Image (cartoon, rainbow, N blue to C red):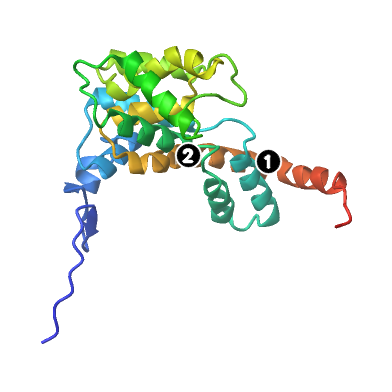
Amino acid sequence: MAEELSFPTGIGTSSADRITLLGQDLAADLMGKVGFGELAFWLVAGRRPAPGETRVFEAVLVALADHGFTPTAIAARVTYASAPEALQGALAAGLLGGGSRFLGVTEDCGVFLQQTLANVDAATADWDAVAVAAITARRAAGLLVPGLGHPVHKVQDPRTPVLIRIAEEEGVRGPHLRLFEAIGRVHPAVLGRTLPLNGAGVCGAALADLGLPVTMLRGFALLARAAGLLGHLAEEQRTGLGLSIYRTVDRNARYVTPE
């Protein structure tokens, strides 16, 4: 007899008259009772967040939803201009641009902070000393410090102090955020210049303090940016700006004869 196939999952299932998600009846227990941010946290963490955790998590999603005409937004708009019948393609084009320079910093920072904290006793840590050692090691390796610097916000990223304050209010300002703050204090002495702690980095620190797996943090950044991209695409339907972007580039392209 052939071995019976089995594909176990704890996410969801359905029958003719019931949909089950995370062990709950979707229609009776979740719809109208659980916010989308809370559900997203629950799906990944495998546990329902406390109200304070939900507030911080949703603040992160809001912080990462949009940042203007970034390459991801332009990619989505121009793709929609080329294929308006495929909204999903335009949204996907924007999400595919989330990487080391845009959005991916959230995960990069979370991973960096977690690795730094691996051999640190958070109860007795001298955060400034830990930060100096971490920055010095990154510099010696020829690597940038994730979460430092921003192409627009040269002095302070307005999202950073707000998210730290919210985490403090909710009692979830943990070792990742404390180390991140210390990096902000000590890096000028190590690097010889002053850079702001950026919003993507503070979001990574906050998410790591919530106990979310750092290897999933880019996914949360993309989840947030999906909403922003949908906003850009809704505006694109009204304005057709993607075609203007295309025409501007096309008309100003300069052909250079290959050598």
Q: Which label number is shown at residue 238?
A: 1
**What residue is drawn where x is 77% and y is 47%?**
246
Name the foreground residue: 16 vs 252: 252
Q: Residue furthest left?
A: 1
Label 1 crowd (10 A; few <14 / some 14-19 / many >=20): few
Earlier residue among tags 1 and 2: 2
User: Relative to 239, does residue 204 appear above or below in the rendering?
Assistant: above
Image coordinates of residue 174 in percent, x first then y, are 27, 21
Name the foreground residue: 16 vs 64: 64
Residue underneath mark 2: 104
Label 2 crowd (10 A; few <14 / some 14-19 / many >=20): many
Name the foreground residue: 231 vs 166: 166
**Quarter of the figure that contains the C terminus:** bottom right
Image coordinates of residue 135 in percent, x first then y, are 43, 24
**What residue is drawn where x is 18% and y is 61%?**
8
- CA separation, marks 1 and 2? 30 Å
Question: Which mark is nearer the camera, 1 or 2?
Answer: 2
